[in-house]
Image (spheres, helix red, strand yellow):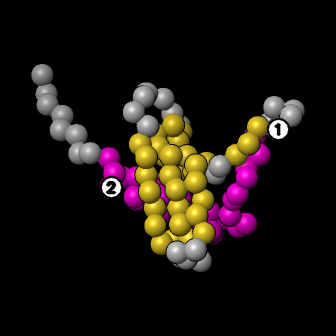
Amino acid sequence: MTITDVRVRKIAKEGKMKAIVSVTLDNEFVVHDIKVIEGEKGLFIAMPSRKTADGEYRDIAHPINSETRQQMQDVILREYEKAIPTEEYTES
């Protein structure tokens, strides 16, 4: 499996969710609504999910193994970092 395209839509409002991402696999299959989340230990991805009748959220699509998840996360977060405008900080 090769990730052939990553599209990042940044979220403008404040909060833990930083972006929504679409990933194309092998130029043949796309997964929409992957979230980039700011957690206590840094950024991570959350796969698209749906709320069940009992109030839990279950992934709609997800990697089968941890190596594939890590590969997807690495590529997505790299593209997310590229999409962030460089901010200049000035000292007062």
- Is 47 part of what is drawn in magenta? no
Spatial distance from mark 1 to mark 2, Cα to Cα?
35 Å
Q: Residue furthest top?
A: 92
Q: Residue at x 18, y 38 (%)?
A: 88
Q: Residue furthest right?
A: 54
Q: Residue at x 58, y 49 (%)?
A: 33
Which numbered mark, 1 or 2, is in the foreground of this view? Answer: 1
Q: Position of residue 12 (x, y in %)?
A: 39, 33
What residue range appears in magenta? 57-84
Q: Is residue 17 left or right of residue 92?
A: right
The secondary structure type at the circle numbered 2 is helix
The answer to whether residue 12 is seen in the rendering is yes
Q: Position of residue 7 (x, y in %)?
A: 44, 57
Neighbour tally class for label 1: few under 14, some 14-19, many 20 plus, Cα within 10 Å? few
- Is 80 part of what is drawn in magenta? yes
Q: Is 67 placed above or below 10 here?
A: below
Specify the quadrant that holds the C terminus. top left
Q: Main secondary structure of the magenta part?
A: helix
* Residue under pointer 2: 82
Neighbour tally class for label 2: few under 14, some 14-19, many 20 plus, Cα within 10 Å? few
Amino acid type, label 1: Thr
The answer to whether residue 38 is seen in the rendering is no
Q: Residue at x 52, y 56 (%)?
A: 22
Q: Residue at x 58, y 74 (%)?
A: 28
Q: Is 26 placed above or below 79 here?
A: below
* Residue under pointer 1: 52
Q: Position of residue 73 (x, y in %)?
A: 53, 59
Nearer the observer, 54 or 38: 54
Q: Determine whether label 1 and label 2 are within 8 Å by CB.
A: no
